[in-house]
Image (cartoon, rainbow, N blue to C red):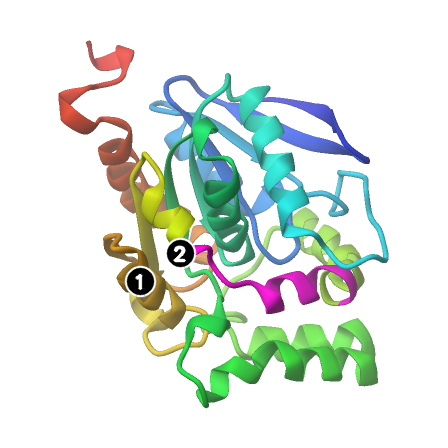
Amino acid sequence: MGNDVLEVDGAELYYEVRGRGPALLMISGAGGDAGYYTDVARALADAFTVITYDRRGNSRSTGRSADPMDLAQQASDARALIEGPAGGRALVFGNSGGAIIGLTLAALHPDVMAGLIAHEPPAVNVLPDGDPARAFFVDMTALYAEGGAPAAGRRFAETTRGEGTYRWPGDLWKRFLGNQDHLFGAEWPGFAAFRPDEAALRAVPFPVVLGAGAEDRGTYYARPSIEIACRIGAPWAEFPGIHMEFLRNPAVFAAALRVLATQLSCREGRVPAEWS
């Protein structure tokens, strides 16, 4: 494993590279930390060049700002990592807010992508009018204004199935706590306002797969994946476990991701050089 820093517009992005083979960029959601995917990246490093990174303003990256997060800028950061460490073209996996960024990247920069796997994007604006889940981000914003990051963080964990049933790595947890004000103060509005560019996503020249965990059926952050898949005519896949199964049971999650990522990377009978 190697790590480095990539200079982008207004920030330095900390990133890690593991393995060899087709490039796989993994984008994290709330907390924006590469450490979410450490064990999965290790498991996939025998088949993929896996790039993980701390998103702008989070953990070991710079660029924190009080201004609301710009999803287009997040997509530009991801593009820079693909053009740099990933070698110019990559399959992209994103979970939660990282899936929202992945969908934005696909709509704005399809030329650098080989495929997209969007796992549980909490795009509540695609849910039907009147659906109570559409108020989630607004309610959390109000809670943050009243009680700060500790209150918002506790409530966020309570709404996420499986949280509290396993332990986070200590270093990741410490960095996440340091990112909470940035999450709820600066990043939240961008995630709350997100609406997928359906026309652009239908037109991309690579496969897009939406997905959600088997234990998350019915949740506000899993249901949008089905709605988006239907709207853009993309396949949908069920993953094992919960929203953060890559932390709770990384071996199981990596096995599922390996199959899907390999299928997307090896269309029309093409296989990686390691198998040729």
Q: Position of residue 129 (x, y in %)?
A: 44, 85
Range shown magenta: 185-197
Is residue 149 visible to the viewer in this orientation of the structure?
yes
Q: Nearer the viewer, residue 185 or 110?
A: 110
- Seen as rendered, the residue at the extreme front is 199
Residue 13, given in percent of the width and then of the height, sits at 71, 33
Q: Earlier in the sequence, mark 2 or mark 1?
A: 2
What is the number of the mark on residue 231? Answer: 1
Q: How many marks?
A: 2
Provide residue 114's location: percent of width, then percent of height: 37, 30
State the separation of the CA atoms marked 2 and 1: 7 Å
Regarding mark 1 in the picture, which secondary structure is present there?
helix
Whether 151 is drawn above or below 59: the answer is: below
Q: Is residue 183 left or right of residue 276?
A: right
Which mark, by number, is residue 198?
A: 2
Q: Residue at x 40, y 56 (%)?
A: 198
Q: Amino acid at mark 1?
A: Arg
Q: Is residue 21 left or right of residue 160?
A: left
- 193 left or right of 269 in image: right
Q: Is residue 142 above or below residue 62?
A: below
Quadrant position of residue 29: bottom right
Residue 84 numbered mark, or none: none
Residue lying at the far right of the rendered structure: 66
Residue at point 56% right, 48% down? 28
Q: Is residue 214 above or below residue 235?
A: below
Q: Are marks 2 and 1 in contact (CB under 8 Å)?
A: yes
